C-alpha cells in the first residue's frame, strides 16, 4: 500500500493503463458524487466488502478513496492481505479532491 497526495494520485492514475479506481464510501456518500469510472464497494459491508473485493482482478493497480482517507487506507490493508500487490490510498479523500466528479442523482 502506498499513501499518495492528491497530486501524486491524480498524476499516477492518469498515466496508469492498468488502473482501477475504487470508492469504499457508503451509498449515501456516493450519491453526492463519485470520481469518474470508479467501482463502488462499501467497506462498511464487512464480509460483503471482502467477498466483492475478492472478485476483482489482482493484477490491476487499485486507486482507493473514501471521504477523508481513513477507510480507504483500511481497505488497502485488507486488499494487501487478500493478495493485491498494488494499492494506492488517496490522502485527504473526497474532502480534498479537486478533480472531476460525476453526480449520481
Image (cartoon, grey):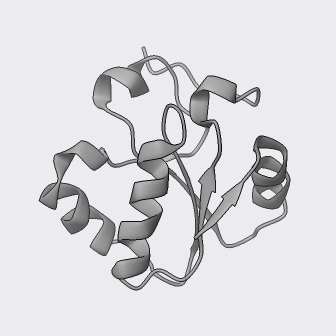
Query: Residue at 41% across / 27% down in the picture?
Result: 30
Q: Can residue 40 be seen in this view?
A: yes
Q: Is residue 59 above or below residue 23?
A: below
- Taking the image as shown, residue 21 lies to the left or right of residue 15, namely left
Residue 69 falls in which quadrant of the image?
A: top right
Number of numbered discs? 0
Q: Which of 57 and 45 is in front in this view?
A: 45
Query: Residue at 40% across / 57% down in the picture?
Result: 74
Q: Where is residue 76 in the image (x, y as percent from the top left)?
A: 47, 64
- Taking the image as shown, residue 15 lies to the left or right of residue 91, namely right
- Taking the image as shown, residue 91 lies to the left or right of residue 74, namely right
Q: Is residue 17 above or below residue 48?
A: below
Residue 42 falls in which quadrant of the image?
A: top left
Q: Position of residue 100 (x, y in %)?
A: 72, 29
Q: In this view, does 19 lie above or below 82?
A: above
Location of the N terminus (image quadrant): bottom right
Q: Nearer the viewer, residue 70 or 17?
A: 70
Q: Can residue 23 be seen in this view?
A: no
Q: Where is residue 95 in the image (x, y as percent from the top left)?
A: 61, 24
Query: Residue at 48% across / 39% down in the picture?
Result: 66
Q: Is residue 77 above or below residue 26?
A: below
- Taking the image as shown, residue 104 lies to the left or right of residue 7, namely left
Q: Position of residue 86 (x, y in %)?
A: 59, 76
Q: Which of 74 and 37 is in front in this view?
A: 74
Location of the C terminus (image quadrant): top left
Residue 92 falls in which quadrant of the image?
A: top right
Amino acid at each position: 500500500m502506498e499513501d499518495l497526495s492528491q497530486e501524486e494520485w491524480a498524476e499516477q492514475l492518469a498515466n496508469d493503463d492498468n488502473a482501477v479506481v475504487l470508492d469504499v464510501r457508503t451509498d449515501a456518500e456516493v450519491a453526492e458524487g463519485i470520481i469518474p469510472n470508479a467501482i463502488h464497494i462499501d467497506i462498511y459491508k464487512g464480509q460483503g466488502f471482502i467477498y466483492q473485493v475478492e472478485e476483482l482482478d489482482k493484477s490491476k493497480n487499485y486507486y482507493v478513496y473514501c471521504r477523508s482517507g481513513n477507510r480507504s487506507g483500511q481497505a488497502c490493508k485488507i486488499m494487501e492481505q487478500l493478495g493485491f500487490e498494488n494499492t494506492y490510498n488517496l490522502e485527504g479523500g473526497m474532502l480534498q479532491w479537486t478533480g472531476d466528479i460525476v453526480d449520481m442523482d
